[in-house]
Image: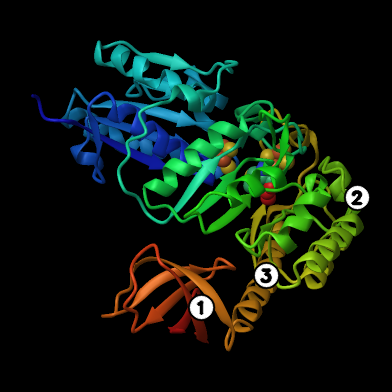
Amino acid sequence: MSAPKKLFIKTYGCQMNVYDSERMAEALGGKGYVETKAAEDADMILLNTCHIREKAAEKIYSELGRMKKLKKGNPDLKIGVTGCVAQAEGEEIMRRQPIVDLVVGPQSYHRLPEMETKVQAGEKALDTDFPEEDKFEKLKGRPKAKRGPSAFLTVQEGCDKFCAFCVVPYTRGAEVSRPADRILTEARELVERGVREITLLGQNVNAYHGASANGDLTLAQLIWELDKVDGLERIRFTTSHPNDMMDDLIEAHGTCDKLMPYLHLPVQSGSDKILKRMNRSHTAESYLRLVERIRAARPDILLSGDFIVGFPEETEADFQATLDLVEEVKYGTAYSFKYSTRPGTPAAERPLVDEDVASERLQRLQALLTRQQREVQESMVGREVGVLLEKPGRLPGQMVGKSDYLHSVHVGDCDKEVGDMVRVHIVASSTNSLAGELIR
Ligand code: SAH
Ligand code: SF4
Ligand code: F3S
């Protein structure tokens, strides 16, 4: 038998890309590929890309530029671009960078094995269709190898919200939910392979409405089905749109023990004028009332958010409204970005905020968010939390895991194993993690 071919995948962007990369590696495993961590050793390189901001997209072209050398050294090397840049730019990528052999958009990954055959025959392969089939059902070959205790599972893809700044509805297509039985089967398989925590993924995961034998299930109903899976200890989901936070999902946060007290609920801005121009279809006030209801169901829930500053025509007063909203919510963690113009989106037509003004606002927002994050983290000291152990720490006898609230926790003097759920008394907080002692 010939030596296995080596596959190197570099993943950019959101968790959905992480999940897709795993599935692509498994599908190409069926064609004799094993993964390598070194691009120099690879027979095939896939860049799984993100198009969300201008910098993210440009990064891909610089990376491809650097790869020219590798291709010179190994003319048999095949280079592919997958993900959202592939969808957005298609053939243009091959024109700009002729070393690229293969371009495939996120909804066509099930065609990857046949595309691989084509590139091995020396042809170029391009596919950016939005076919009707469930790509994950067709993307078989998930090996039964043991894996880490925490896994992503995509349940919904695409987006129908069309926020005025965002490329996702164009790169991922319309909202589609995967059928519940396939998700449950996949979840059981993951648990058999050692997974203890599953994070359900979707661009609008809380708009999930997947088919089941008993009619469509909501996300909360799907979570209750997963709650019955023996051996699965924790359930999370991301990302949620405020308008799809239904009553049964809010309630589940108070009643489902496996559903973790953490919620990523992007608001983007605290100004109603800007929210309207962003086409978010919620107001600052409706978001704050929603947060109140969620906290009434689960008082200790840790909230996370996304923010865009410097959206076209954002004034100082609009920005101040964002700071006010942040002060009121008190986020445990958050992601904030400077607005980036995306060609083809409605906001791209609007007048820009001065670059320096936007940068200065971003700094102020990040200072506030960092302070809140630190305060929330420090408030964990003295508390008892659940921790799922993920890997050995750097010190002897130390293990590292994630708390229920998704904080990294270093547990000293720990004789437990990766994949164990333990109770930990938090004793200290440092910049990006907590330290704790095992409760025996
Ligand atoms: N589906 C998710 C978001 C996906 S994109 C949701 O709706 O929550 C992740 C984040 O990137 C967004 O929440 C937004 O804050 C940011 N983002 C999206 N488009 C952007 C743009 N054009 N410029 C700057 N940030 C952007
Ligand atoms: Fe983009 Fe808005 Fe859809 Fe999120 S909800 S993916 S920000 S269009
Ligand atoms: Fe980026 Fe596509 Fe995800 S644009 S954020 S990789 S859906």
In 3D space, how far apart are the residues under numbered discs 1 and 3 (Cα atoms)? 13 Å
Identify the residue position indicated by label 3 in the image: 369
Quadrant of the rendered image containing residue 234: bottom right
Residue type at mark 3 is Leu
Residue sitting at x 30%, y 43%: 145
Question: Viewed as shown, does residue 148 lie left or right of 231?
Answer: left
Which quarter of the figure is the C terminus placed in?
A: bottom left
Identify the residue position indicated by label 2 in the image: 273
Residue sitting at x 39%, y 25%: 97
What secondary structure is found at the residue carrying circle 3?
helix
Q: Which of marks 1 and 3 is nearer the N terminus?
A: 3
Residue toward you, 173 or 177: 177
Residue 93 placed where, x, y %? 45, 24
The answer to whether residue 372 shows anywhere in this view is yes
Q: Residues within 10 Å of mark 1 (few under 14, many from 20)?
A: few
Identify the residue position indicated by label 1 in the image: 431
Q: Is mark 1 within 8 Å of ligand 1?
A: no
Note whether 303 is above or below 50 in the view shown. Answer: below
Residue type at mark 2 is Lys
